[in-house]
Amino acid sequence: MFIVDAHLDLSMNALEWNRDLRESVFEIRRMEEGMIDKPDRAKGTVCFPEMREGNIGLCVATLIGRYVKKGSSLPGWNSPEQAWAQTQGQLAWYKAMEESGEMVQIKDTASLESHLKLWKNDDDKKKPLGYVLSLEGADSIIDMSYLEKAYKNGLRAIGPAHYGPGTYAQGTDATGGIGIKGRELLTEMENLNMILDATHLCDDSFRESMDHFNGAVWASHSNCRAFVNHNRQFTDDQIKELIDRGAVIGGALDAWMMVPNWERGISTPEGRNVTMEILIDNMDHICQLAGNSKHVGIGTDLDGAFGKEQCPHDLDTIADLQMIPELLKKHGYNSEDINNIMHNNWIQFLRKNLK
Ligand SMILES: [Zn+2]
């Protein structure tokens, strides 16, 4: 079954983890054996061959570059200009992948439709992977003229905040509103017809963003606070508001967002019994709040600075997302619901909201 994954940090993996995603994930793991610079070395789950194996023909792929003010303990660049340059390096990698036929950028309905047709009809085993370009944390947008540049480069969605305080909004584990700069960003995004990604907005910034932004909203990789009581997760009221706005919420596979009190580097997926079933529980919770299956999708965040040490133990590679239809069926979901969740909700959203 065709799958859309609405959150993959592909270029971050290529440039910061030095992973050539054209290699098999097993080869990448082998190459990383013995490396200790990052906790997820030799534990990756994502590569192009496994995405094709799992029929994940379309994803939302990110640019990430954080600017940190003096005194912050978060990792990041010391100026927005450096953060911008970081995202432009990441963009250059996506462009190189396009030139080598591995990827294709989806930036309007025409490119979306022709891509979907290709994946439906073509038996070619090495079809290009479609990607919608998104920016996770907007600190790298130096001023609004850079937002226009970014749009011209294909950027179609922005999550104004990531972890901690940001220039345009406050993110996970931070507090506070979006300020004048945040309002200016949202207005410009609306003018450019860009999608607002509500993921990572802290409660205050979520509230203000919803009030100030009149365009299309999605939450690319977010789970429910009903299961894990943390500000990174959405409350039922926030989920209901997103549903009212026509949003689709992508279920994420980071273990700490799936079971409460996860301790990084100490808890294990086996020890805490983190399984794909928990993703289904999150999806089901949102479907129950909506009264239908039209607002849930997949947004795994796989290899988003974590690997097999911190994701469901019944998933080995991203290709295993193909187990989701069977799990949904077990929970009483019919084939239309399953299609909605696996791909259709994201596709309909893009059809409606890409120019
Ligand atoms: Zn994220």
Image: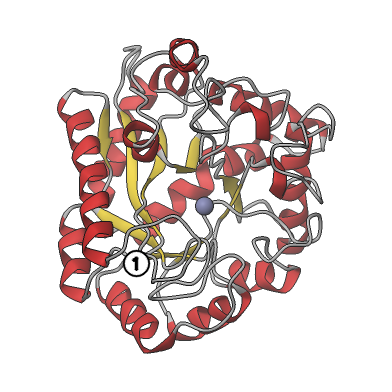
Position of residue 92 relative to residue 75, above or below, is above
Which residue was labeled with disc 1? 139
- Give the quarter of the image for residue 172: bottom right
- Does residue 152 sit above or below 263 in this rendering? below
Which image quarter is the C terminus in?
bottom left
Write down the quadrant of residue 39 in the picture.
Answer: top right
Q: Measured along the vertical axis of the image, is residue 83 above or below residue 7?
A: below
Amino acid type of the residue tagged 1 in the rendering? Asp
Is residue 122 or residue 155 the one in the foreground? Answer: 155
| Residue shown at 23% from the left, 70% from the top | 142
Q: Quadrant of the N terminus?
A: top right
Q: Position of residue 66 (x, y in %)?
A: 37, 59
Residue 199 rendering spot, x and y as whole percentages: 54, 61
In the figure, is residue 35 to the left or right of 321? left
Q: Is residue 327 left or right of residue 4?
A: right
Q: Is residue 195 left or right of residue 284?
A: left
Q: Nearer the viewer, residue 289 or 48?
A: 48
Residue sitting nearer the eye, 107 or 182:
182
Q: Quadrant of residue 289?
A: bottom right
- Look at 53% across and 59% down and name the residue there: 219
Q: Residue furthest front?
A: 71
Secondary element type, mark 1: loop
